Image (cartoon, rainbow, N blue to C red):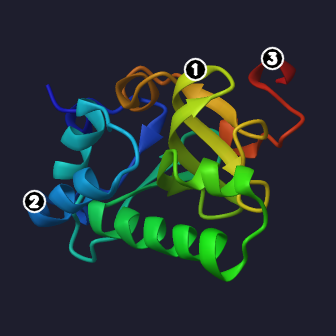
């Protein structure tokens, strides 16, 4: 049972925008990631290559928001960009470098929120954080696993519109 074939009913996407492949890029993701990535993420990567190698955009029904899960190629590009930007070009703090080097960024909301997998203030899982506020303390946990998020719908209730001071309990 693949994640793509069992996407939660609250999420929709254009099946024609995705395709299989990208094994070379997935191997690079596995070798470059600073943390061990979960099997359900690797399974998802295998099915979201797409013709333009960007990833897949999920629309949250009844919400109007979007969640873009990057393909392996795009995730590698983003990893290299964030790593270079925050560890070399614009060094801000050792804490930020430690954060960048301890998580894997996997998508965004096509706006100001970035999604990552790693260990945050609520344990290991999927988190989102405002692009300008990188750090574990600023991040909000979405779900424990990609399966929980994309198949079981955990964290899809207006989560893309929350800001650092809000939680799902505020809805």
Residue 57 visible, this orientation? yes
Asked whether disc 3 touches disc 2, contact meaning CB atoms under 8 Å apart, the reply is no
Residue at x 67%, y 64% (from the top left corner)? 111
Q: Secondary structure at mark 3?
A: helix
- Judged left or right of residue 9, residue 20 is left
Q: Which residue is mark 1?
A: 123
State the CA–CA distance, disc 3 to disc 2: 40 Å
Q: Secondary structure at mark 2?
A: helix
- Judged left or right of residue 10, residue 138 is right
Q: Which residue is mark 3?
A: 169
The image quadrant of residue 41 is top left
Q: Which residue is mark 2?
A: 23
- Judged left or right of residue 34, residue 168 is right
The image quadrant of residue 39 is top left
Residue 158 visible, this orientation? no
The nearer-to-camera label among 2 and 1 is 1
Decide: is 67 above or below 155: below
State the CA–CA distance, disc 2 to disc 1: 29 Å
Mark 2 vs 1, N-terminal side? 2
Decide: is 47 above or below 165: below
Q: Position of residue 141 (x, y in %)?
A: 63, 29
Observer-nearest of 99 and 38? 99
Q: Secondary structure at mark 1?
A: strand
Q: Position of residue 66 (x, y in %)?
A: 56, 53
């Amino acid at each position: 049972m693949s994640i793509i074939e069992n996407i939660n009913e609250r999420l929709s996407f254009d099946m024609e925008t995705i395709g299989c492949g990208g094994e070379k890029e997935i191997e690079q993701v596995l070798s470059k990631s600073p943390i061990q990535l979960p099997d359900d993420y690797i399974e998802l990567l295998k099915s979201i290559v797409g013709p333009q190698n960007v990833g897949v955009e999920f629309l949250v029904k009844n919400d109007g928001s979007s969640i873009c899960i990057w393909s392996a190629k795009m995730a590698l590009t983003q990893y290299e960009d964030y790593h270079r930007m925050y560890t070399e070009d614009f060094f801000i703090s050792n804490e930020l470098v430690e954060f960048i080097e301890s998580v894997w960024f996997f998508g965004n909301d096509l706006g100001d929120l970035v999604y990552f997998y790693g260990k945050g203030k609520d344990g290991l899982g999927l988190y989102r954080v405002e692009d300008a506020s990188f750090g574990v303390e600023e991040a909000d946990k979405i779900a424990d696993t990609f399966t929980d998020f994309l198949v079981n719908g955990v964290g899809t209730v207006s989560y893309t519109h929350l800001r650092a001071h809000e939680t799902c309990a505020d809805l």
